[in-house]
């Protein structure tokens, strides 16, 4: 099947994923970004009964089957504004954080185009970890204690303060997942502190939080918020949470570590105070707030980080659990109408396993042929499996090739976590990419 031929696109079957095909569809949507998250967004928006035209900038091979790809980088704000204007877009959905930190939403607002994603001032919750810590302190949201260190600070005294546990050092810049060091080695912690002060002027040293991590994606606007089912990502490259940090090697949803009690505590002690705080800044936060949680044995959640976008790959396995038309949800949040919407969820599970290129994360090999990828949903009575494209493109002969470190992920949903994980692995085993690797233990904590 080639680009543009998927007129019957949609998930089918007993699980009821197929939504009515557009009859009165009249909306034009532009998705910004080109990774697995944006492919997942396009998959959902393509099924909306409201979306007439779907565009993506720059997109990937997967989005080219669902949307019109435009060669505009996600960081080219002028290019994106121009594109949104000539398309006469009804909605722009920002995938990554970089355009939001560079004022994409602010610029769109000035020309009257709604944006799913916050204005730059609020996107700074992800842009600056120090700012996020200050906000959490002001909003009385639980998070690790911290020191801000700069030239002349007593580094040894600060290290002493948090001794006994690993040291957590965080650079205060967008560093694409490479800005945090967690180490038991005092020399390594000190060296990273000194290096960060030299390059950024200051650095954060945090108290270590023990526990299990989970991601809660919260759709927010000036009228309210909707918490999506919590998920768990696997950030280390290799099995058993070994190896270097990555963007994420796989995820599953819902994550049982977020019990009903933990979820309610998260809403009461973190989400509500953050929503109130963001309202008090004068301009509503319109988009998704990614709340990175650490849940200790006591079940009292702490915030590890905020992101101002969907997680990748969390997005790929969280959106399919939303029963409500995803366009309606994103459009409502972009126009302060969330409180009017009744959002419903499916009660199944979803899991995704990332296929990474040889050399990822240090120096991924790109440009290799990929075999065995289908664009279709593989369905049985109770399950669905599908491929999310991330770093994919076409060579000059139209063959599918790898263009990034995280190349694609194989996803599946089903009535149990076991079944969705099993199907995701069955699918990934059928795909060939020389030198690629993937984790064999996705969801091991929950299973
Ligand atoms: P961040 O970019 O802030 O999410 O940090 C990257 C990773 O470092 C997190 O996903 C955690 O695994 C770990 N981490 C960050 N802060 C802490 C902390 N205070 N205690 C324990 N682990 C942390
Ligand atoms: N998967 C982690 C993130 O998107 O930040």
Image: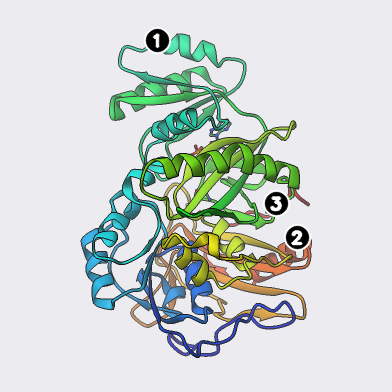
User: Which dot marks residue 417?
Assistant: 2
Q: Residue at x 43, y 29 (%)?
A: 134
> Which of 405 and 257 lies nearest the eye of the viewer?
257
How far from the left and from the top, in percent, is residue 41? 49, 68
Q: Quadrant of residue 419?
A: bottom right
Earlier in the chain: of badge 1 and badge 3, it is: 1
* Figure disc tally: 3
Graded by Cα atoms within 10 Å as few (under 14), some (14 to 19) or many (20 or more), the crowding at tag 1 reads few
Q: Residue at x 31, y 67 (%)?
A: 113
Q: Report which residue position mark 3 lands on.
A: 255
User: Which dot marks residue 154?
Assistant: 1
Q: Quadrant of residue 214?
A: top right
> Which of 398 and 149 lies nearest the eye of the viewer?
149
Give the alpha-carbon distance from disc 2 to disc 3, as whole Å. 9 Å
Mark 3 and mark 1 in contact (Cβ < 8 Å)?
no
Q: Nearer the viewer, mark 1 or mark 3?
A: 3
How far from the left and from the top, in percent, is residue 264? 69, 44
Q: Quadrant of residue 321?
A: bottom right
Q: Is residue 309 above or below residue 13?
A: above
Q: Secondary structure at mark 1?
A: loop
- Residue 196 is left or right of residue 263, and the answer is left
- Residue 280 is left or right of residue 74, and the answer is right
Q: How is the image coloured?
A: rainbow
Q: Secondary structure at mark 3?
A: loop
How far from the left and from the top, in percent, is residue 21? 55, 87
Give the alpha-carbon distance from disc 2 to disc 1, as whole Å. 48 Å
- Residue 34 is left or right of residue 446, and the answer is left
Q: Find out if the beta carbon at label 2 lies less than 8 Å from the nearest ligand 2 atom.
A: no
Give the alpha-carbon distance from disc 1 to disc 3, as whole Å. 41 Å
């Amino acid at each position: 099947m080639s680009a543009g031929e998927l007129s019957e696109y949609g998930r089918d079957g007993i699980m009821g994923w197929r939504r009515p095909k557009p009859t009165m569809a009249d909306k034009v949507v532009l998705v910004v970004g080109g990774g697995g998250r944006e492919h997942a967004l396009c998959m959902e928006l393509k099924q909306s009964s409201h979306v007439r035209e779907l565009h993506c900038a720059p997109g990937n091979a997967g989005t080219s089957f669902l949307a019109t790809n435009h060669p505009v980088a996600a960081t080219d704000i002028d290019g994106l504004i121009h594109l949104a204007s000539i398309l006469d877009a009804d909605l722009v959905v920002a995938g990554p954080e970089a355009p939001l930190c560079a004022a994409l939403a602010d610029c769109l607002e000035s020309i009257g185009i709604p944006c799913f994603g916050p204005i730059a001032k609020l996107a700074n919750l992800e842009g600056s970890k120090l700012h996020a810590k200050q906000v959490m302190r002001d909003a009385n949201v639980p998070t690790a204690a911290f020191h801000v260190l700069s030239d002349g600070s007593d580094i040894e005294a600060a290290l002493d303060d948090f001794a006994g546990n690993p040291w957590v050092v965080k650079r205060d810049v967008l560093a694409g997942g490479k800005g945090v060091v967690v180490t038991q080695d005092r020399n390594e912690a000190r060296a990273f502190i000194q290096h960060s002060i030299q390059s950024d002027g200051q650095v954060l040293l945090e108290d270590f939080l023990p526990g299990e991590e989970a991601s809660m994606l919260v759709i927010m606007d000036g009228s309210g918020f909707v918490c999506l089912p919590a998920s768990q990502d696997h950030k280390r490259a290799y099995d058993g949470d070994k190896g270097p940090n990555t963007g994420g090697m796989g995820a599953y949803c819902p994550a049982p570590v977020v019990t009903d009690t933990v979820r309610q505590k998260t809403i009461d002690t973190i989400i509500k105070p953050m929503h109130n705080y963001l309202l008090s800044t004068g301009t509503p936060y319109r988009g998704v707030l990614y709340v990175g949680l650490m849940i200790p044995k006591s079940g009292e959640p702490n915030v590890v980080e905020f992101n101002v976008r969907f997680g990748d790959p969390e997005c790929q396995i969280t959106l399919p659990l939303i029963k409500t038309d995803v366009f309606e949800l994103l459009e409502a949040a972009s126009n302060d109408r969330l409180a009017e919407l009744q959002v419903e969820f499916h009660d199944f599970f979803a899991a995704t396993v990332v296929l990474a290129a040889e050399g990822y994360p240090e120096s991924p090999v790109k440009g290799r042929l990929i075999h065995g990828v289908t664009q279709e949903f593989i369905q049985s009575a109770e399950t669905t499996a599908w491929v999310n494209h991330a770093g994919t493109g076409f060579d000059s002969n139209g063959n599918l090739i790898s263009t990034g470190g995280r190349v694609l992920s194989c996803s599946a949903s089903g009535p149990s976590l076991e079944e969705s994980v099993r199907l995701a692995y069955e699918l990934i085993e059928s795909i060939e990419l020389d030198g690629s690797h993937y984790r064999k233990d996705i969801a091991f904590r929950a299973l």
